Each structure stands twice: as structure tokens, then as C-alpha cells.
Image (tube, rainbow, N blue to C red):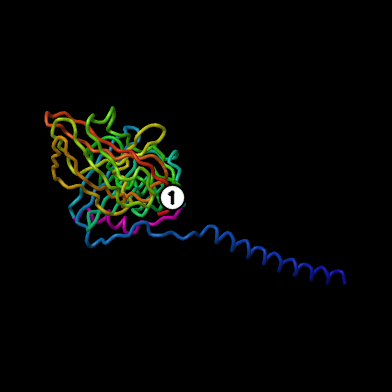
Amino acid sequence: MIRKETIKLSKRTIKSLLFFLSITCLIEFAGCSKSEDHVFSFPREKVQSFSVYTYDIDENTTTSNWMYSEKDMADFLSYLENLTGTKVDTLDTSALSSHFYGVELNVDNPYTLLLIGDYAINYQGEYYKIDGEKAAKMCQSIVRDTRVGEGVSYLLNHRYLSLLEGVWDTTYMMESLYSGAPLEDAALTMLEASIDTQKERLILTLENHTGSTLEFGSMYSLEVLVNNRWYSIIDMINSNINYGWTSILYILKNDESMGDTYSLRYHQPLPSGTYRLVKAVTAENGTQGYLSVEFQVDADKMN
């Protein structure tokens, strides 16, 4: 009798153990089997050329190389087309090191991608965990040492390294090129001094009372004030759209004014803070200076 009960108990125990192990395996399988997604989507058949920009943290310099040969492009484009990773919410910039690789594909509009260590950021601002060693190997096989400048201004969409969770992180931002006081007896003004974050077009007026003719192009620099320092965000485009400027030269005579506009469309969303637009100008005697206008962005303000 005792032996019979013991056998029954053993069967019950075995069933319980099997059930427990089954549930455990299912939980572990679910936890370890996060599916990987394609990081980058682009019309490969339309790619005419591409560039790879490399930012070296230690040297604070950017190098670049444009590729036009179909033979050289084939393997790299296949890599990008098949690149997969696990999507993550954000990344810790303090943990980044070594080189950053910015890829720009020349299609109808430029498609851009950042490969940084074990992370990739696509042109939609999505973060993915990837095989960093493979990414570095592929980029290094393309990049040549063609220096184009200091800092990260040539890495399109590096806003996604700087605008994290709605706050500007200046670690990889370029400080303003404009220092000192703006040009005297001339002004750049804006219709509204405070705007909501979704405002797309700023209405501007330029005035000249310097006693001299002023010359300038169409370009403005958009900057943000962080810890009492101005940082340029003009290159941080939020879309795969080439945000270019015309080559028109404007001439503003003394005691005249002209209207202008500036679109914030490709910089959305802008977090709350103090911003300014800067316009480089040249006087008739060759003196160079700048005009600027500050404005406030209120992310909580409704249209």
C-alpha cells in the first residue's frame, strides 16, 4: 500500500515538474527571441552614389569619401539593405566611443544613416542595436582619408545624437561660429518673439541703417542656447530631404528694409528653449559681420 501511494506521488511530481519546465522554457524562449528588424529602407535601384562620413571623437574631425563605382558600391549597399537590429528606445551618448559613420545615399532625396559602435540610427530617428564590428568593418572598407572639417557638422541627422528625450545634449553639437556683438545700425527682427513648437514659418524683416550697402546670401543659421552658449542646429535635419540654399546674392541699400521667411519644417519638433536665427552679412567696404534675432519656443503652447 505504501509502495503504491509512493508510485502515484512520483507520477504526480513528474507531471508537475514537466509542466514547470515547459512554462520556464516558454518564458525563456520569449525573453531571448526578440525579433530583429531591418534598420534601413531605400530604393536601391535608384542609388547613383553614396558617401560615408567618419567622425573621430579623439581628433574631433570628420572625413568623407564619395563612391560612384557600381563594383565598389555593390557589397556595401547589400550590407545596408540587409542590415538588421533590435529596436531600442534611446542610447547613452556617454558610452559611445571610437568612430561614428554617417552614410548618405544619393537618390531622389538623400537617405542618411548613422552607425555608431553597436548602434544604428536611421533617417526616421529610430535606434537599433546592431553588430558594431561588422558595421565598422564595412565602413572602413569604403572610407578614404579625405578631410572635410572639424566636429560633426557633416554628419546628417546627428540631431538624433543631440536631441534625446526632448532635451538638447551638447556632447556632439557644434558651437556657434558667430561671436561678439552683431553688426551695429542694422537689424534682423521677427514678427513673433515667442512661438509654439509646431510653427513652421517665421516672418522676418532685415533693416540697414549702417550708411553702407549690405550684401548677403539666402542662408540662415539656426542656433539654440544651452548653458549660456549658442550651438548650431542647422545641419540637424529631421528628414531625408536636402535642405539647401540658393546662390542668390541680395543687396540691401542704406535705410532700406526687406522681408524674408524661414521654415522650421525640417527641424520639428523643437523642444522648449531660447533660439536665434543668424544671418552673415558683408558691408560695402568688405567688413563682415552678422545679424541675429532671438525667439522663444514653447513646446506646451497650442496653436
Name the residue rendered at 38%, 39% in the picture.
Answer: 274
The magenta stretch spans residue 85: yes
* Residue 256 vs residue 198, the one in the foreground: 256
* Residue 110 vs residue 82, the one in the foreground: 110
The magenta-colored residue range is 70-88
Estimate the x, y position of residue 176 in percent, counting from the top left: 30, 34
Q: Specify the amino acid type for callout 1.
A: Lys
Name the residue rendered at 87%, 69% in the picture.
Answer: 2
* Residue placed under numbered mark 1 in the picture: 301
Magenta stretch: dominant secondary structure: helix
The magenta stretch spans residue 294: no
Q: Tell me the quarter of the picture where residue 233 sits.
A: top left
* Residue 256 vs residue 109, the one in the foreground: 256
Estimate the x, y position of residue 200 in percent, counting from the top left: 32, 52
Q: In the rendered view, would you say 25 is above or below 159?
A: below
Residue 72 relative to residue 21: left or right: left
Q: In the rendered view, would you say 272 is above or below 108?
A: above
